[in-house]
Amino acid sequence: MSKTATKPEKQLVHLVVGGELTDLKTAEFKDLSKLDVVGFFPNFAEAHKAWLGKARETIDNAQMRYFIVHLHRLLDPSTDVTKKRAAKKKV
């Protein structure tokens, strides 16, 4: 029996954060001291699970919003797949 070694998934750090907004058309929070930092996650799938849980918890508060921040794009811009997709479409 031979097992093929699987390459570990590359870590792409994401942050889930939320709070009440001043206006639903912007991403400006009413009070930064009350910002809910849900946590840091190693990939988008895990961050999405956390985001979805918090969004469902706060569904009754129309001003409350949670966001997934792609920190890996700030730390290493080469991990931004949206730019790579756009470049492929132009070719």
Image (cartoon, grey):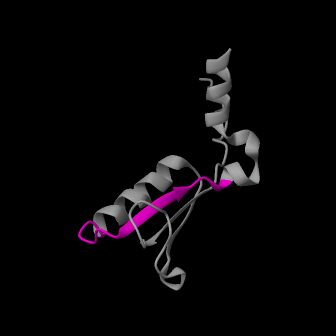
On screen, residue 6 versus residue 16, left or right, reads right
Percent across and percent down for residue 31 are 49, 82
In the rendered image, the vertical position of residue 70 relative to residue 3, given as above or below: below
Q: Position of residue 44 (x, y in %)?
A: 52, 48
Is residue 85 in sight in this rendering?
A: yes
Q: Quadrant of the N terminus?
A: top right
Within the image, what quadrant is residue 22 found in? Answer: bottom left
Quadrant location of the C terminus in the rendered image: top right
Residue at the image point whose x is 63% and y is 41% from the top: 9
Residue at far top of view: 91
Q: Position of residue 16 (x, y in %)?
A: 51, 63
Q: Which residues are magenta?
A: 58-71
Quarter of the image holding residue 80? top right
Residue 6 vs residue 21, the one in the foreground: 21
Is 30 in the magenta? no
Count how many numbered circles sit on residues in the image: 0
Q: Residue furthest bottom?
A: 33
Q: Is residue 84 left or right of residue 51?
A: right
Residue 39, above or below 51: below
The percent position of residue 81, horizontal first and vertical second, equals 64, 35
Please report the residue visible at 67 percent of the width from the left and 43 percent of the height from the top. Answer: 10
Outermost residue toward the left? Answer: 60
Quarter occupied by residue 63:
bottom left
User: Which residue lies at the image location 40% right of the left edge and 68% below the top edge?
Assistant: 23
The answer to whether residue 69 is left or right of residue 48 is: right
Q: Is residue 3 visible?
A: no
Q: Which one is nearer the viewer's eye here, 13 or 66?
A: 66
Residue nearest the viewer, comparing 37 with 65: 65
Residue 62 on the magenta span: yes
